[in-house]
């Protein structure tokens, strides 16, 4: 079992929903997907590399015949998979503090969801519906979401400077280089081993 | 399309695991045992197959009962969950998996119902698609860069930090000449391998988290 690889944590959660409620949730996700400003808080959290929600209808479990017995369920299920930086507690705390309204809109359709505030009962609920990861791979275990965003800014700025570096005079280059340093100086954070968090 | 965010594809696969009372240990345990021994670094199968940003494999034993007044119910099968965040389109990604790591795929999925084996590429792709779940909402913090572009950018970021630190106060002509050499050298270097921890660097420690 390994929920953690380098600087990223894999969370899996599954919650039951009455089937009629899933259509409301699908509507909410449709709006969230098409109205980008609604995603602002999710983007601003800045430590989520990838996340997804999957509404799994009670009759939508893959059935391949052979020896498999068909599922017979009363509930639809909401699956949540997240890849985030930091510890479980930091993540749930930040989720609760920053995204409480959004989280309520997502999970209020799930059975027994207590609300994302206060955080104590929210954490108890998440701990109950979470299940562990058996194998977790990341192509860049030493980097966080912010490192990746910063690295692409540095790469893009370097590419721009490289284009003009050969043509200009040394003094023109020195001026351009200074502008480049000012542009990238806040994006040069160190990557590497994650600190051990208690 | 909810399975995609920009250029990144969110693949979710749920494969029913074989229930066989005679199997010892059971197939789900055999999967777990195999996964526990699989490398998660440069020699991971997902590092060998191109295009995987992050991926996970999870044995889902059952759905979770959240307590009264909810109804308690159980799954008939255990499922292997494969969640991958990958570059490009689904067919291309599945083809790259089956072409580069067929033995690993077989070692994992041979415990699943109806798995045809990786030897038959089209049957493998059809099987995976039959087990695929559509994502309802997908979020990717960076959705317009490939794995190799990101690894290259992280390499650049470290190198640029070093270059800036070692060229403070350099005169303009030296700076320009050495910058051009630096860029040429950087371009000639291969990007870091997926799954690697990057260059080992001394980091001053002593923070409150350590």
Image (cartoon, rainbow, N blue to C red):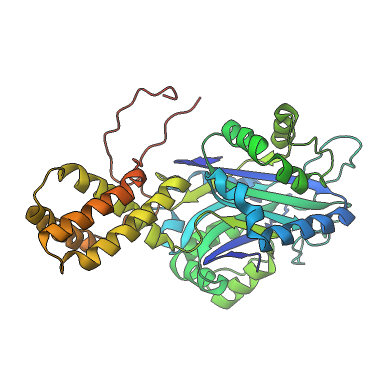
Residue drawn where x is 51% and y is 62% of the image: B86
Which residue of the protein is positioned furthest toward the bottom in this rendering? B122
Q: Picture coordinates of residue A188 (x, y %)?
A: 33, 45
Q: Look at the image and tell me in which quarter the N terminus of chain B lies.
A: bottom right
Q: Is residue B144 left or right of residue A13?
A: left
Give the number of marks. Answer: 0
- Between A81 and B20, the one lying in front of the other is A81
Q: Look at the image and tell me in which quarter the C terminus of chain B lies.
A: top left
Residue drawn where x is 88% and y is 51% of the image: A18
| Residue B152 location, quadrant | bottom left
Looking at the image, can residue A53 be seen? yes
- Between B91 and B45, the one lying in front of the other is B91
Q: Picture coordinates of residue B60 (x, y %)?
A: 69, 48
Residue drawn where x is 89% and y is 56% of the image: A20
Q: Picture coordinates of residue B133 (x, y %)?
A: 69, 62
Q: Above or below — where is B66 with respect to B49?
A: above
Q: Above or below — where is A128 with respect to B159?
A: above
Q: Is residue A46 left or right of residue B41?
A: right
Looking at the image, can residue A52 be seen? no
- Between B159 and B83, the one lying in front of the other is B159
């Amino acid at each position: 079992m390994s929920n953690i690889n380098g600087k990223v944590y894999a969370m899996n959660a599954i919650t039951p929903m009455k089937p009629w409620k899933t259509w409301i949730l699908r509507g909410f996700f449709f709006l969230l997907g098409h109205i980008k400003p609604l995603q602002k808080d999710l983007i601003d959290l800045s430590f989520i590399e990838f996340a997804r929600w999957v509404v799994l209808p009670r009759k939508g479990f893959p059935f391949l015949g052979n020896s498999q017995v068909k599922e017979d369920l009363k509930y639809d299920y909401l699956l949540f998979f997240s890849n985030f930086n930091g510890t479980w507690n930091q993540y749930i705390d930040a989720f609760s503090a920053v995204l409480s309204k959004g989280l309520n809109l997502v999970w209020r359709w799930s059975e027994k969801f207590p609300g994302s505030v206060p955080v104590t009962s929210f954490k108890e609920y998440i701990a109950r519906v979470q299940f562990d990861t058996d194998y977790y791979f990341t192509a860049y275990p030493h980097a966080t979401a912010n490192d990746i965003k910063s690295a692409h800014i540095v790469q893009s700025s370097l590419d721009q400077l490289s284009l003009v570096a050969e043509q200009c005079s040394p003094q023109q280059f020195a001026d351009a280089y200074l502008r480049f340093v000012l542009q990238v100086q806040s994006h040069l954070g160190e990557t590497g081993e994650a600190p051990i968090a208690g | 399309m909810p399975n995609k965010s920009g250029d990144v594809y969110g693949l979710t696969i749920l494969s029913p695991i074989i229930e066989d009372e005679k199997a010892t240990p059971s197939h789900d345990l055999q999967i777990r045992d195999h996964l526990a021994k699989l490398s998660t670094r440069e020699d991971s199968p997902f590092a060998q197959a191109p295009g995987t940003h992050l991926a996970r494999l999870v044995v889902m034993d059952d759905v979770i009962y959240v307590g009264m007044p909810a109804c308690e119910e159980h799954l008939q099968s255990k499922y292997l969950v494969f969640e991958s965040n990958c570059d490009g389109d689904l067919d291309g990604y599945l083809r790259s998996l089956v072409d580069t790591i067929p033995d690993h795929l077989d070692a994992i999925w041979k415990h699943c119902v109806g798995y045809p084996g990786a030897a038959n590429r089209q049957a493998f792709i059809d099987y995976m698609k039959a087990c695929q779940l559509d994502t309802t909402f997908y979020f990717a913090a960076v959705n317009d860069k490939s794995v190799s572009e990101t690894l290259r950018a992280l390499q650049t970021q470290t190198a640029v930090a070093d270059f800036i630190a070692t060229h403070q106060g350099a005169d303009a002509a030296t700076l320009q000449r050495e910058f051009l050499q630096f860029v040429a050298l950087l371009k000639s270097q291969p990007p870091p391998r997926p799954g690697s921890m990057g260059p080992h660097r001394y980091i001053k420690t002593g923070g409150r988290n350590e």
